[in-house]
Amino acid sequence: MALFTVSTPFNIDLEFSLAAFHKRMLAWLIDLGFLTVYCYIMLFFVYGNVGDNLREIDDRFQVETVLRLFTITIPVMLYHLLFEVFMNGRSPGKWLMGIRVMNKEGASASFSQLVLRWILFLPNYFLVLVTYVYAPAYLFGLLAVLGIAALPDVIAIAVSANSQRLGDLAAGTVIVDTRYKMNLAETIYMEVEDTGYQPLYPQVLKLSDRDINGIRNLLNGKVTRDSENYMLRVAYRIEEVLDIKMNGDALTFLQTLLKDYNYLTQNN
C-alpha cells in the first residue's frame, strides 16, 4: 500500500494511503459512464422531441447548437469540477470507489487547486466530442482518442512519487483512499472514564486532529533520550502556539493535552 506523508506544524509526520491506480481508473470509467448516459438521454429523448418543434425554424441549426452547448457540452465540461467542489474532492465515481482529492498538506483541496487540476485534465476536452457523436462505431473511436489523451497523465502517475497526474503536480494535490482505516489504537481516540475530570488546558481545542494525532504518535513511540528532548521541543512549541504554561515535565504535559482533547471533544 503506497503511503503519502504529511508533516504537521510540530514536524511530526502523518501518513495517508494513496489511491490505487485501478481505483482511480474505475472511478474515471464510472464517471464516463454517467456522462455518456446523460449525453445520449439528452440527444435521443430531449432533442428528439425538441427537433420536431424546430423543423419550421429557419435557423434551426443555430438554435440546436446553442441548446446543445448549454444542456450538454457545458455540463459535461464542468462535471468533474462541480462535483469535486461540492462533494469535498469527490466525483460520483470517486465516491463509489472511496477515493478523494486532497492537498499535500493533508487538508481539503481549495477551489483554486481544483480548478487548476481540472484545466490540466486533457481528456476533458476530448470528452466534449461525445456530445456530437451518434454512431456507436465513432464512439469507440472517440474512446480510443480519450485513451491516447490520458497517456501523459498515466505516465505522470507512474513516475511521480505520490502517483500524481499532471494536474495534481501543478495544483499540489493528491488522490487518497478514504476507506483506509486505522484501528482504534492507532487513532487519537482515548476513553476518559472520569466524569468529574477537569481539563487543565481547554485551549487544546485550537489544535487540529492532525496535530493531536502527531502528539499521540510521539507518545506511543519508544522513549529514549533523543525522544525526550524532542518531546520537550514540541511541548515548548505548543506552549507558544496556545499561549499556555505546562505543569510538570514534557511527557506529562503532552499526555494531559491528549486527555484534555478527548474529554472536551467527547463532552461538547
Image (tube, grey):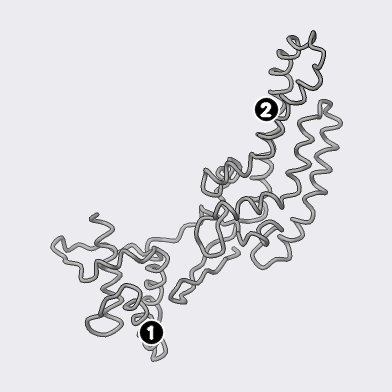
Q: Secondary structure at mark 1?
A: helix
**Which residue occupies the foreground of this view, 265 or 239?**
239
**Which residue occupies the foreground of this view, 106 or 178?**
106
**Spatial distance from mark 2 to mark 1, Cα to Cα?**
58 Å
**Which residue occupies the foreground of this view, 217 or 239?**
239
Whether pointer 2 and pointer 1 mark residues with C-beta atoms closer than 8 Å, the reply is no
- Rendering quarter of residue 139: top right
Residue farthest toward the front in the current orientation of the protein: 58
Q: Could you say where residue 63 lies in the image, as x and y percent from the top left? A: 76, 20
Residue visible at 65% across and 58% down in the picture = 168
User: What numbered label is drawn on residue 71?
Assistant: 2
- Which amino acid type corresponds to the residue marked 1 in the rendered image? Arg
Mark 2 or mark 1: name the one nearer the start of the chain. 2
User: What numbered label is drawn on residue 244?
Assistant: none
- Which amino acid type corresponds to the residue marked 2 in the rendered image? Thr
Residue 130 appears left or right of 207: right
Residue to which mark 1 is pinned? 233
